Amino acid sequence: MAAHRRSALVDELILARADAHPDRTAITDARTGRSLTFGQVADGARRLAAGLGVARGDVVSIVAGNSADHAVALYGALVAGAAVHHANPALTSGELARQFAMTSPSLVLADEQARVAASAAADSRTRVHALEHIAELLAAPRAAVDGRVGSDLAHLCSSSGTTGLPKIAAHSHAGTTAGLRSLAQVPSKQLTADDVVGIVIPFTHLFGSALLHHGLGSGAAVVALDPSPFDFEAFLRMLQDNAVTVAPVTPPILRALAAHPLVDRFDLSRLRQLFCSAAPCPPDLLDAASARLGCEVTDNLGTTEAWGVAMSAQPPVRGSVGRIVPDLEAVIVDCDTGQRLGPGETGELWLRGPAVMQGYLGSAGEPDGWLRTGDLCSFDAAGNLFVVDRLKDLIKVGGYSVSPAEVELELTRHPAVADAAVVGRPDPALGETPVAYVALCASATRDELRDWLAGRLAPWKQVSEVVIVERVARTPAGKLLRREAAQAVG
């Protein structure tokens, strides 16, 4: 991303590529085959910025799957001076309403979920516009918004943090561009104009947004496949038909690539690298996928709070998620004493640097600037990072983060539920699945409780099992003891 290297504004950094190479293909929708050139993305973003009717400092929520129009909406909102709130389109009306209450968007751009988004915004003055009618918002480009600076908010992304209900991680333009520049300096993640990046990770996830920015900002072509519902054959066809060279994946996708017989029907010879993130990935799975596909397969670490954290070394060190990216400080700290630990010692990973979020929306960041990740990690003597376990209660389901507190909240809204604890259970395909331990105050079946959740939470937040217990373990002060609740039954 050499062009516009000094810009601290995300849209300027990315759209500089459009000004340099307007006629090259920038993004293709894998399902429809519709493509936009770099010039069309830039022109569309600048015209959309003029027609959105928002001002610097406003928030625009995007509730949409991966598409070329999603990219135009994202950069258009940023050009207009707004911060973009990313909301997964699979969220229910209640989940969206909670996020809207935290982010206060003045405008929501939604795809097929426009009706759900409208319902979620019904109690506010928020405007909702269907993304399929984005052309109605295009106007003549206007002069750049005055006064924009790097500290302006750019991305608002849902994160479960370390405890409690989902929070909104707030990233500035300067922090985002710092993260992108760090990523561009990592040899194993550098892209060229000859690369084609196939993205099935949701653009509404910070991982997906980072890859979109990194791909277009490097001058590479991006092919976007909407992941909901995920169609493995469509994913393989995207890789083959678009001659994809680099693709980010989650462990469940990588497992299919390593073992599914359907893979043999497709020509994936152009792939040079798959990089896995979003959830822990077993080293033997990385090796199996690499051997079958004949390309490099790596494990990496990123967080919603700090963009890319560790990227694979060359050659990759199996079992490690890589080395800390440039311009990011990392230390391992004893969880009890706060003492900094050395190589080979396990403790909590703390991070500090320009790419770390400003804080969770509505709350101040850490006073010392260190982000306490809640991850138990260790470094070896060469600086390779190893993730050992998680301190936090967050459940990772196929790359999605599930807040146990959010699922517990919905369960306890059922009139027959007195108390509930939700715990992650290991799953060979998804990494983990949520299991609910429920104490009842009236008659209810397990199926009734699962049906209750089905209409209130997104698919990846659904529990795989409901266990009825006499009582849910808590401390005398009332703090929920999730692990003890599971052990009392097991």
Image (cartoon, grey):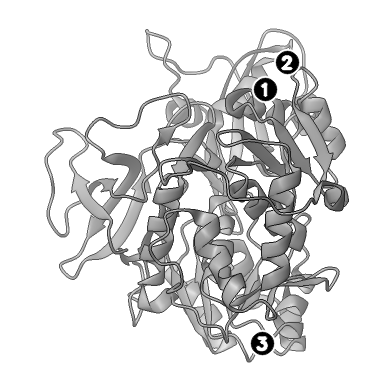
Above or below, comparing residue 98 to residue 284 in the picture? above
**What residue is rendered at 17% in x and 53% in y?**
345
Hey, what amino acid is under mark 1?
Glu
Q: Position of residue 220 (x, y in %)?
A: 58, 77
* Residues at marks 3 and 2 touching, judged by CB atoms closer than 8 Å: no
* Residues at marks 1 and 2 touching, judged by CB atoms closer than 8 Å: yes
Q: Which mark is residue 268?
A: 3
Q: Which mark is residue 414?
A: 2
Which sits in the foreground, 176 or 229?
Answer: 176
* Residue that label 1 marks: 410
Q: Position of residue 376 (x, y in %)?
A: 30, 47
Q: Position of residue 250 (x, y in %)?
A: 57, 62
Q: How many marks?
A: 3
**What residue is rendered at 74% in x and 10% in y?**
415
**What residue is rendered at 46% in x and 43% in y?**
171
Q: Secondary structure at mark 2?
A: loop
CA gap, disc 3 and disc 1: 43 Å
